[in-house]
Image (tube, coloured by chain):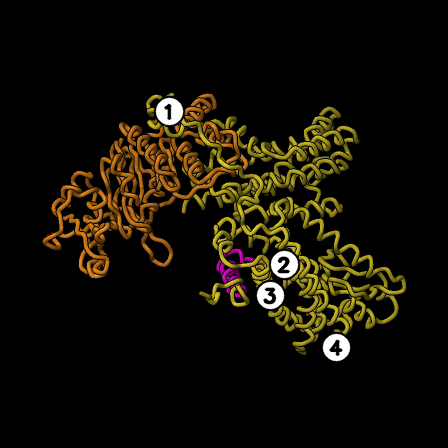
Chain colours: A yellow, B orange
């Protein structure tokens, strides 16, 4: 007897689209998506600054394009290609985690779904988020062009081509990288986010070097991944010879820069080579997705590596001695929970922060301690303190949203005085943890009598602790804190004015930014308090 | 000790009432909340555990308002929510130590109590393993342990036997029976057999309304003479489902044995049976009308 095999062997295109649609709808129907779109509108309104705004977003030499359709599209496109991949990564990187936590992944894993089909669906879902952001950006760009009024002639092709074509390959790659990071066990969490942040910084560097490699020009055209050298090199052609061609290329918020001179530019919408290059860069997505598929465990819990089979219990415990011990045989605890025991609680919170880290985590920490002792106190504050806090990022970020991440909110909320007793101790624990990470540096500062600098570091620790609690309460997760911490950390290491939250040994306490960070820390703590209180009142 | 629930209701967005006008007086012993999924049991449990604030009504513990002053309840409470998480990198012992600290149990007393609870709940051999590797049943036992960390005068357990195997379930029932006495134990479940051995009173909830509060004996007494076993051919089952309220079915060699709830005998060959609690619960539900 023969039978025709009608069983589905894979999801097929319809299945992929259905899976992508479901994932997208799940995202769209969240407050976070609305916040992302509102932030897109808000940031979009800052893209075309007026002359007296005090900052510039995009300039070549001493010039920028007149705010016509092509330049407006290019400004949005360049930011979409350079900044959005960083912010967007933190927004989209939860597709697999969500299917894991909701157990939907197990259902999908039991279906004929293939790895590449599943990842393809998630890629489409990621891209639909980016498409929504670009669509909103397009509307804002049109509106801003009209509002600024330098050139009110709308050329939709010029605006949309630059706005979409510049970032699209980068956003596809970002989507695939997010899936790769979610598929590789070690990169799923906060550590992966740190790795991505530095990857993002390092990847853009060579492009900038390449663009500025030609001494005779401001921008050297190449087939760059970010798609910005061709339009910017073309724009340079339109800058009149002379002082406007002095200087370099500036992308992002260049605060305090002199207002650049507007120059007419009609864009490169007719540049077939550039358009073809952008199309070819889209292909980069495929190998990244293939690598992700190699690592993707198809939600097999046995591949997690940590879970061990439950050991067989001794018969005396499990079956033979079936009658349980009587409750009244347990040692009674009289009037429990009538007193607040902050030290016991602090010890428990610190244990949560410090325990169960890998051998290498402690080894690196010891290395940082030794370095902190070996180098000068000033260098230790400048380098060891921020690096040690970066090393503690995974612990900090989880600390701020631990109850939400692990679903223990109800257990904690039913304990006595959950707000008054828990939040201050959690803040104190994170502050102490931050100081433990830099303990030898603190001892050194106190021994050397640099009390003001030590106080700056303590304020920095308090600020980091308050940040994780506030941003954890705002977002219900750890990624918002990770993103903001990393950006601030990088700014501090680049000596951006005011960014040295971890202390500046060259300045006395009063002259440093520590008093400001102390106020910010207090405000963040108050925010965490208000948001937690609101949660408890539901 | 006494808990008074007075006109409690909870309205969610879209004017959807998960619970409406529930009034109940609880004294020491085990009260079982019985109702189908989505009946409002967990909402009532969350309100009693001070996790959720009611839209209407009040809850008094020995005359003190627990809505205005939730710590009145929290100081005496052990709570096992229906869905709860654990910190996967901590061991059971570490996790319980952490929660004991949060609840304010003195460290030395907590250490002793944790060892006793681990033993009581058969977790000693796994106590030093990270919770991330625990099975569902083991995690549920950790949840039960944390609810018993102090000497809770009020114990609220929501679907406590979910994920437990039959032996663990029986062990838990023993424990609950042993725990009652001076304590108020509120146990929510949709598994009637969980309550048979333990509950001194049963509250039947459906569609957010309290339908009935009574002792199991009274509920069963009411269903006496209304429970019938009738063995029928498989082909007749669909027709019988249309005509009678069916409590259960059991496949037999000669057909299907159908347990029917009916005021009168459904057929001459049907045999009257003594009602079990499940029959009594279904009968009570069928007799009550839920107001719109």
Is residue A295 in the magenta section? no
Q: State which quadrant residue A316 falls in.
A: top left
Residues under numbered marks 3 and 2 in contact, where contact means CB atoms less than 8 Å apart: no
- 1 vs 2, front mark: 2
Q: Which badge, 3 or 2, is on the more N-terminal residue?
A: 3
CA distance separating discs 1 and 2: 55 Å
The location of residue A407, given as percent across then percent down, is 47, 43
Q: Which residue is mark 1?
A: A335
Q: Which badge, 2 or 4, is on the more N-terminal residue?
A: 2
- Drawn side of residue A226 relative to residue B52, left or right: right
CA distance separating discs 1 and 3: 59 Å
- 2 vs 4, front mark: 2
Q: Which residue is mark 4?
A: A270
Point out the image quarter for the N terminus of chain A: bottom left
- 1 vs 3, front mark: 3
Q: Do circles 4 and 3 both sit on a common chain?
A: yes
- The extreme right residue here reads A216
Residue drawn at (59%, 56%) of the image: A92
Q: Which residue is mark 2?
A: A175
């Amino acid at each position: 007897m023969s039978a025709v095999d009608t069983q589905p062997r894979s999801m097929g295109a319809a299945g992929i689209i259905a899976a992508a649609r479901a994932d997208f709808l799940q995202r769209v129907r969240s407050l976070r998506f609305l916040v992302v779109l509102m932030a897109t509108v808000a940031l979009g309104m800052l893209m075309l600054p007026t002359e007296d705004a005090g900052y510039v977003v995009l300039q070549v030499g001493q010039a920028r394009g007149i705010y016509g359709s092509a330049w407006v599209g290019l400004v949005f496109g360049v930011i979409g290609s350079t900044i959005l991949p960083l912010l967007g990564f933190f927004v989209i990187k939860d597709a697999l985690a969500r299917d894991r936590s909701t157990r939907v992944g197990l259902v999908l894993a039991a279906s004929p779904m293939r790895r590449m089909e599943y990842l393809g669906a998630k890629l489409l879902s990621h891209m639909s988020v980016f498409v929504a952001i670009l669509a909103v950006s397009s509307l804002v760009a049109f509106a801003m062009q009209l509002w600024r009024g330098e050139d009110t002639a709308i050329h939709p092709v010029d605006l949309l081509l630059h706005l979409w074509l510049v970032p699209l390959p980068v956003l596809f790659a970002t989507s695939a990288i997010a899936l790769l990071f979610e598929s590789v066990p070690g990169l799923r969490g906060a550590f992966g986010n740190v790795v991505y942040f530095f990857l993002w910084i390092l990847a853009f560097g060579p492009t900038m070097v390449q663009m500025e490699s030609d001494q005779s020009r401001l921008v050297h055209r190449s087939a760059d991944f970010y798609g910005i050298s061709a339009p910017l090199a073309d724009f340079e052609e339109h800058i009149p010879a002379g002082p406007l061609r002095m200087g370099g290329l500036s992308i992002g918020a260049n605060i305090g820069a002199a207002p650049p001179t507007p120059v007419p530019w009609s864009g490169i919408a007719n540049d077939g080579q550039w358009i073809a290059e952008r199309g070819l860069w889209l292909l980069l997505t495929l190998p990244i997705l293939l690598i992700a598929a190699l690592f993707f465990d198809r939600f097999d819990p046995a591949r997690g590596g940590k879970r061990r089979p439950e050991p067989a219990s001794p018969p005396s415990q499990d079956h033979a001695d079936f009658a349980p011990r009587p409750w009244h045989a347990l040692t009674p605890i009289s009037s429990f929970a009538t007193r607040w025991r902050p030290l016991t609680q602090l010890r428990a919170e610190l244990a949560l922060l410090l325990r169960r880290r890998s051998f290498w985590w402690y080894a690196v920490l010891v290395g940082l301690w030794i370095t902190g002792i070996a180098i000068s106190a000033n260098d230790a504050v400048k380098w060891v303190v921020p690096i040690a806090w970066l090393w503690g990022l995974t612990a900090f970020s989880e600390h701020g949203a631990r109850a939400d991440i692990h679903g223990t909110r109800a257990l904690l909320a039913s304990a006595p005085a959950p707000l008054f007793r828990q939040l201050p101790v959690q803040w104190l624990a994170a502050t102490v943890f931050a100081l433990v990470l830099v303990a030898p540096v603190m001892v050194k500062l106190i021994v050397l009598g640099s009390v003001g600098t030590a106080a700056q570091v303590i304020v920095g620790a308090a600020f980091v602790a308050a940040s994780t609690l506030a941003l954890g309460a705002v977002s219900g997760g750890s990624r918002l804190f990770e993103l903001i911490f990393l950006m601030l950390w990088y700014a501090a290491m680049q000596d951006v004015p005011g960014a040295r939250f971890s202390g500046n040994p060259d300045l006395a306490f009063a002259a440093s930014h520590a008093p400001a960070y102390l106020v910010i820390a207090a405000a963040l703590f108050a925010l965490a308090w208000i948001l937690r209180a609101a949660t408890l009142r539901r | 000790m006494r808990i008074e629930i007075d006109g409690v209701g909870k309205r969610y967005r879209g004017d959807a009432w998960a619970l409406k006008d529930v009034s109940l007086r609880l004294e020491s012993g085990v009260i079982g909340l019985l109702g189908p999924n989505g009946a409002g049991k967990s909402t009532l449990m969350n309100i009693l555990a001070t996790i959720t604030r009611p839209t209407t009504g009040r809850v008094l513990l020995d005359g003190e308002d627990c809505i205005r002053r939730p710590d009145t309840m929290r100081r005496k409470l052990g709570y096992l929510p229906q869905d709860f998480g654990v910190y996967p990198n901590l061991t059971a012992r570490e996790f319980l130590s952490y929660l004991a600290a949060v609840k304010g149990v003195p460290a030395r007393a907590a250490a002793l109590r944790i060892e006793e609870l681990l033993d009581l709940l058969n977790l000693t051999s796994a106590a030093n393993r990270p919770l991330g590797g625990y099975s569902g049943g083991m995690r549920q036992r950790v949840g039960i342990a944390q609810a018993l960390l102090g000497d809770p005068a009020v114990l609220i357990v929501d679907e406590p036997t979910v994920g437990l195997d039959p032996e663990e379930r029986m062990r838990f029932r023993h424990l609950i029976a042993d725990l009652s006495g001076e304590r108020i134990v509120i146990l929510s479940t949709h598994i009637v057999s969980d309550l048979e051995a333990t509950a001194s009173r049963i509250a039947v909830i459906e569609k957010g309304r309290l339908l009935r509060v009574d002792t199991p004996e009274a509920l069963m007494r009411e269903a006496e003479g209304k429970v019938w076993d009738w063995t029928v051919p498989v082909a007749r089952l669909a027709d019988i489902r249309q005509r009678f309220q069916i409590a259960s079915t059991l496949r037999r060699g000669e057909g299907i044995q159908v347990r029917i709830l009916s005021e009168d005998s459904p057929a001459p060959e049907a045999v009257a049976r003594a009602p079990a609690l499940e029959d009594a619960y279904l009968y009570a539900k069928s007799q009550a009308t839920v107001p719109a």
